[in-house]
Image (tube, helix red, strand yellow):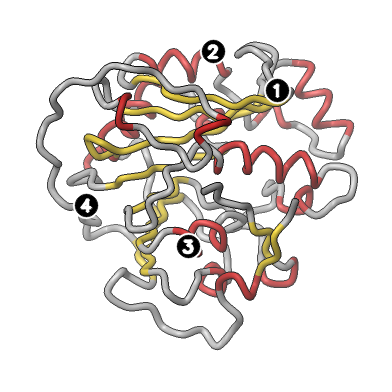
Amino acid sequence: MTIRFLLPLRQNIHPNNERDPLAFYYRRTTGWLYRHRLQMGLDLLPSDRSSRILEIGVGSGILVPTLTAHFRHYTVLDLVLADGLQSLVAPECQASLATLDLLDTAAFSGAPFDTVVCFSVLEHIRDSHAAALALQRLLAPCGTLVVGYPMVNPLMTATFAAIGYRRIGDDHVATPAVIDGALRSVLTQVGRRAFPPGARLATALYQCTAWRHPGAEQQWLPADRNRAINTAGATELSPAPPAFEYPPSARTLWPTSSRPDQGRSTGPAAAAPVG
């Protein structure tokens, strides 16, 4: 079953800083491409609704309605929290949110997440190897990591400038080759989608890749298995790690045990499916 992207109603979502690309999702000229790159990643996600999912870099919350409508347990880690994220969560989803740095290894005490998503984050981190190690620790032994990242070169900088996103080169500091190499050093790639379709690592404008711990490749089951690349081979896996716990210094909102009703539209009612 393919997880279909739900675009939040514009009035229900807010940027988390002045560089947030939120507006581009709603423009006629760029919206289709921004939405399509997220759908590429959704096509690589597992279809198990009961699994625990972690989103790293929630940004404005553009994926919150989609992920919380599909997964029953949803956790967010980000440096800055946008206003109104609570209103985007589906009513039946148990959600948690905290402001944490992915590279703050002391902040994490376990990695029980069956699914981890990280879109348009890794290109902003200079130490790609440290980021890959952090993602590895947050991923359960049989879990699936899905990441997405854009082309990073002068051509892409010029392209972003042409659509109104200037100085993107100041934000993008890690190339796809560096990110891919760091992830391959600790995980095994099990799926990939790119735009344009079939584009290689260096020529894709945007690409999404799925990863698992070495030895867990054969157990990978994407939501859309016909659109992903799978690999064979499996070995015995180690026991599951201890439950994830937030450090005392983390700022948390609406923990999984309860979530206050914000009195506004939530979940799918606050979003619309897109083609």
98 to the left or right of 270: left
Residue carrying label 4: 244
Q: Amino acid at mark 4?
A: Phe
Q: Amino acid at mark 2?
A: Ala
Tag on residue 69? none
Residue drawn at (22%, 60%) of the image: 248
Sequence-wise, which precedes: disc 1 or disc 2? 2
Sequence-wise, which precedes: disc 1 or disc 4? 1
Asked which secondary structure carries label 2, the reply is helix
Residue carrying label 2: 177
3 to the left or right of 56: right
Q: Are marks 1 and 4 in contact (CB under 8 Å)?
A: no
Q: Amino acid at mark 1?
A: Pro
**Residue 253 visible, this angle:** yes
Please rate how many residues cluster around mark 1, counting C-alpha atoms within 10 Å: few if below 14, some from 14 to 19, many from 20: few
Residue carrying label 1: 197
Which of the 4 image quadrants contains residue 199? top right
